[in-house]
Amino acid sequence: MACAGFAAPSAAEPSPAAASTAPAQTAAPCAPAALALREVSETAGVLPEAVYALGNRGAAACRISGSLGIRMFDAQGKPLPLRFGPNSTMATLLTLGPADEASFTVTYGRPGVAQCALAARIDVYLAQELPPVSAATSFTACALPAVRVSSLRLGVPPAAGSPAPSVSPPPSVSPTASPSPSPRFVARAMRRLPPLIATA
């Protein structure tokens, strides 16, 4: 079955996945049944965007290609039409340890969405000949403009709207009051003053 959404990589992108390419040669490919898909966040606006995560729920590390394809369906299971734009990031072979996750982003290339419908399910294809990994979603799928599917990257970004870590203000320092001179000190100082000379 042909799967829409696979895009040929055209440009390199720095990624922490480079550190995991060495063990990828010995790890077995990730089986779709060993992966779990979830929606991480969704951002509405001029350019709607959704972030999804693929996690390894198996007991051993496995390797996965950074390039993937997607299909979206409505609540009745009907496929929603999508046009796919080129992927501008380099796909890297990733290694997922047990409970590790990799994430990707689905967004639109320009403003002016049209012919939209609310998606209820997303299918992710690691390869056209493999069964998909599915998850519930609430992303708005539009036939126009072209949708972009990023390459997988290790880790999951913070969800939109997550509170920033609080920073405690530095402790306030009260000014130290100068001690008042004792009466004995004042008396000694007065005795050392020269006598006042009255002038006519």
Image: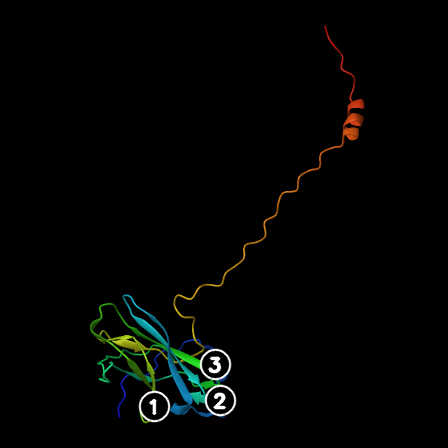
For the point 44% across and 86% down, the residue is: 56
In the figure, is residue 74 to the left or right of 15?
A: left
Name the kind of residue labelled 1 in the image.
Ala
For the point 38% across and 90% down, the residue is: 32
Establish if 140 lies above or below 194.
below
The alpha-carbon separation of the residues under discs 2 and 3 comes to: 16 Å
In the figure, is residue 154 to the left or right of 107?
A: right
Report which quarter residue 9 is drawn in. Answer: bottom left
The alpha-carbon separation of the residues under discs 2 and 1 comes to: 19 Å
**Secondary structure at numbered mark 2:** loop
Q: Dot 2 corresponds to which residue?
A: 61
Name the kind of residue labelled 2 in the image.
Ala
**Rendered location of residue 47, percent (x, y):** 28, 68
* Crowdedness near tag 2: few (<14), some (14–19) or many (≥20) residues, C-alpha within 10 Å: many
**Rendered location of residue 20, percent (x, y):** 49, 83
Q: Which residue of the protein is positioned furthest toward the front in this rendering?
A: 76
Q: Dot 3 corresponds to which residue?
A: 18
For the point 27% across and 88% down, the residue is: 3
| Sequence-earlier tag: 2 or 3 | 3
- Residues at badges 2 and 1 in contact (C-beta under 8 Å)? no
For the point 62% across and 45% down, the residue is: 174
Q: Which is more toward the observer, 25 or 188?
A: 188
The alpha-carbon separation of the residues under discs 1 and 3 comes to: 21 Å
| Sequence-earlier tag: 2 or 1 | 2
Establish if 37 lies above or below 45.
below
Name the kind of residue labelled 3 in the image.
Ala
Q: Which mark is residue 127?
A: 1
